[in-house]
Image (cartoon, helix red, strand yellow):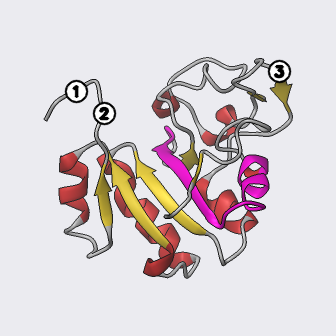
Amino acid sequence: MEIYAHRGLHTQYPENTINAFLAALRYTKKIELDIRLTKDNHLIVIHDETISTTTNGQGEVSTLTLKQIQSFKTKSKQDNKLSDDKIPSFKQVLESLPKTTNYQIEIKSQESIEPTLTLLSEFNIKKSKYFLTSFSKESLKSLQSYSSQKTLLLIDQRKTF
């Protein structure tokens, strides 16, 4: 059995934050995270299309810059308590976690595939240390033109395919 910390240890820290990932590494070396592109083409680690669920800010990720997004505080899902943790860029996550970390990277848009693979390559993350997932068959098919990397299609139980 493989155990991946879904969005980090988000019962103790805001989800998809560096502190949530570092805390999760006490239990597993395998982290699941979500990638989206900002207006200024930075990869950030956030699940939702908007920042209102996980921060004290408002707006869609794709319409905000990295600087704007990181000006907000994250909040806990359990009690909405604000934290000084920021929504991290994917680069910040790769800089902060040990090289022994394994990643399940959920691609939220086809446009984020190439920059994600480029950043993983720049950080010398071996293909054996990550795999990409998506709810989009098209995104995973597109990924095949970039890489022979292991992929996983996610299925939403509310939808049929």
Task: Please state the horizontal and vertical placement of residue 67, each as a whole percent of the image.
Answer: 68, 39
Residue at image coords 75%, 27%: 76
Residue at image coords 56%, 56%: 4
Task: Please state the horizontal and vertical placement of residue 45, each as a whole percent of the image.
Answer: 58, 46
Q: Are marks 2 and 1 in contact (CB under 8 Å)?
A: yes
Residue type for callout 2: Asp
Mark 2 crowd level (few <14, some 14–19, many ≥20, 10 Å Cα)? few
Pointer 2 residue: 156
Please report the bounds of the magenta region as a residue range. 19-39
Mark 1 crowd level (few <14, some 14–19, many ≥20, 10 Å Cα)? few
Residue type for callout 1: Lys
Residue type for callout 3: Lys
Q: Earlier in the sequence, mark 2 or mark 3?
A: 3
Pointer 3 residue: 81
* Front residue of 121 and 126: 126
Camera-nearest label, 2 or 3: 2
Q: Quadrant of the C terminus?
A: top left
Q: Earlier in the sequence, mark 1 or mark 3?
A: 3
The secondary structure type at the circle numbered 2 is loop
Dividing the picture into quarters, in which one does residue 9 lie?
A: top right
Q: Residue furthest right?
A: 84
- The answer to whether one can see residue 21 in this image is yes
